[in-house]
Image (spheres, rainbow, N blue to C red):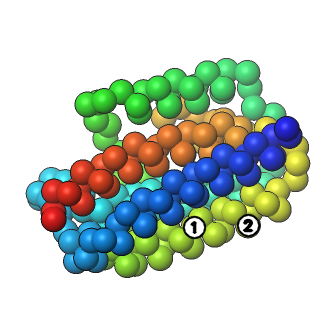
Amino acid sequence: MSSKNLLLKEFSKMESERLSILKELSSYSEQKLSEKPSPNQWSVAEVIMHLVIAERGALAYMNKKLEFGGHGKAAIGSGLKQRLLNLAITIPGLKYKAPTVVELKKEDSVDYAEAKAKWDAVRSEMKKEYEALNEKLAEHELFKHPAAGKMSLLQGIRFMRQHMNRHIGQIRNTAKAVS
């Protein structure tokens, strides 16, 4: 299977998982999904906005690289970086501070309906961009993790999927806590 087809397959899985959690959340009131369980914890809406910011950032980086160039095929070590990142975020009980570029800011504080709409919009844009992507570019360094650095787009989508799934657990716990 080509790298682009693998990219689209991974994106499709990630999108199915997103739609599944949104379906689960439909049994909660939008008010509850906008509520913080405690002052130092994110609401479901804020967790979703964190994902929106991360996905927007990934898309912006890709588009910048495609527009200005300066990218090539991913280095051999980038696959190891992606696997180590995925492993690190699956360790139960370990918490990570969001990198500055994906931190929530005051203007990112929205209610659940708006967060969901923004997530829908960024996913729609990602799908459009990935489908239009030149076949060979899925293997290029078009994804950059704030701490781990550059990876191929395919490696990036694999990381984003794992990142989202970590936060899906947080979303479930938060929804239960505010109910």
Q: Which mark is residue 165?
A: none
Q: Secondary structure at mark 1?
A: helix
Give how far apart the Cα atoms at labels 1 and 2 are: 10 Å
Q: Which mark is residue 122?
A: 1
Residue under pointer 2: 128
Looking at the picture, does residue 77 appear above or below residue 38?
A: above
Along the line of sight, which residue is nearer the eye, 169 or 152?
169
Q: Secondary structure at mark 2?
A: helix
Q: Is residue 68 left or right of residue 23?
A: right
Is residue 131 among the parts visible in the rendering?
yes
Tally of numbered tags: 2
Q: Amino acid under label 1?
A: Val
Kindly give the residue lying farthest to the left in the view shown.
38
Sequence-first disc among 1 and 2:
1
- Splitting the image into 4 quarters, where does residue 29 fall? bottom left
Instruction: Report the quarter where the N terminus lies.
Output: top right
Along the line of sight, which residue is nearer the eye, 125 or 151?
125
Residue 62, given in percent of the width and then of the height, sits at 69, 53
> Quick one: label 2, few (<14), some, or many (20+) residues within 10 Å?
few
Instruction: Report the quarter where the C terminus lies.
Output: bottom left
Looking at the picture, does residue 140 appear above or below residue 26?
A: above
Q: Is residue 141 left or right of residue 3?
A: left
Q: Residue at x 58, y 58 (%)?
A: 15
Q: Residue at x 71, y 58 (%)?
A: 63
Residue 101, given in percent of the width and then of the height, sits at 44, 51
